[in-house]
Image (tube, rainbow, N blue to C red):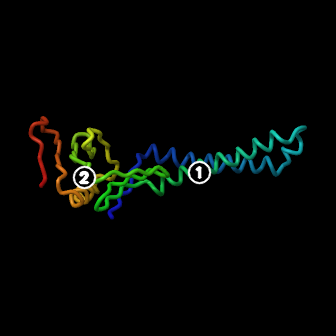
């Protein structure tokens, strides 16, 4: 099984780290509020208890989601399946369902086209494109590999056997 780590943009990575920091700050503020006796000062303690429980649960859940995005976002290729893991969201498809790999040089994108006419854009480092393509072609040698170069018009795509 070959694994290829998902490449987030710098802005997305910054937002994930900001989200993690906000989760920790929110948890800390809520903890401080509970310790200082915010619940004891209210006339009916039921609503503040519900509020504080939710304010503990929400940052923890968001923290788990954001950390899982950083740790567990990857593509993996086995002999039978192409698996996509995006944090806690995971999906897989049969390698035989992939028809075309298109390397689009003008946009620096790697696209996979499937038999059901859907496609996805692969987000890995450009240095890993060849290894990714080789792993997919090794799993299914019938996949057609095309390169769309800046000079090509669409009629003259290069093919790899």
Name the spot of residue 151 as percent of width and height, x first. Answer: 13, 38
Q: Nearer the viewer, residue 72 or 11?
A: 72
Quick check: marks 1 and 2 in contact, CB under 8 Å?
Answer: no
The disc label shown at residue 96, or none: 2
Q: Nearer the viewer, residue 120 or 67?
A: 120
Q: Nearer the viewer, residue 78 or 32?
A: 78
40 relative position to 144: left or right: right
Comes first in the chain, label 1 or label 2: 1
Q: Quadrant of the N terminus?
A: bottom left
Secondary structure beneath label 2: helix
60 relative position to 149: left or right: right
10 relative position to 57: left or right: left
Name the spot of residue 67 as percent of width and height, x first. Answer: 53, 54
Name the spot of residue 100 as percent of width and height, x first. Answer: 21, 46
Q: Marks 1 and 2, how far apart in space?
A: 36 Å
User: Can you name the residue that lies furthest to the top here?
Assistant: 153
Q: Quadrant of the C terminus?
A: bottom left
Q: Residues within 10 Å of mark 2 (few under 14, many from 20)?
A: some
Name the spot of residue 94 as percent of width and height, x first. Answer: 30, 53
Q: Label 1: which residue?
A: 63
Q: Residues within 10 Å of mark 1 (few under 14, many from 20)?
A: many
């Amino acid at each position: 099984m070959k694994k290829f780590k998902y490449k987030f943009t710098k802005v997305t990575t910054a937002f994930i780290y900001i989200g993690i920091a906000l989760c920790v700050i929110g948890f800390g503020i809520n903890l401080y509020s509970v310790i200082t006796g915010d619940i004891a000062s209210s006339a009916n303690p039921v609503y503040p208890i519900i509020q504080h429980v939710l304010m503990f649960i929400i940052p923890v859940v968001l923290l788990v989601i954001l950390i899982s995005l950083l740790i567990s976002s990857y593509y993996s290729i086995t002999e039978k399946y192409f698996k996509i893991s995006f944090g806690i969201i995971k999906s897989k498809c049969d390698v035989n369902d992939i028809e075309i790999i298109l390397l689009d040089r003008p946009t620096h994108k790697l696209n996979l086209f499937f038999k059901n006419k859907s496609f996805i854009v692969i987000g890995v480092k450009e240095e890993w494109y060849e290894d990714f393509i080789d792993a997919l072609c090794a799993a299914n040698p019938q996949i057609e590999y095309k390169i769309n170069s800046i000079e090509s018009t669409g009629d003259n795509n290069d093919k790899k056997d």
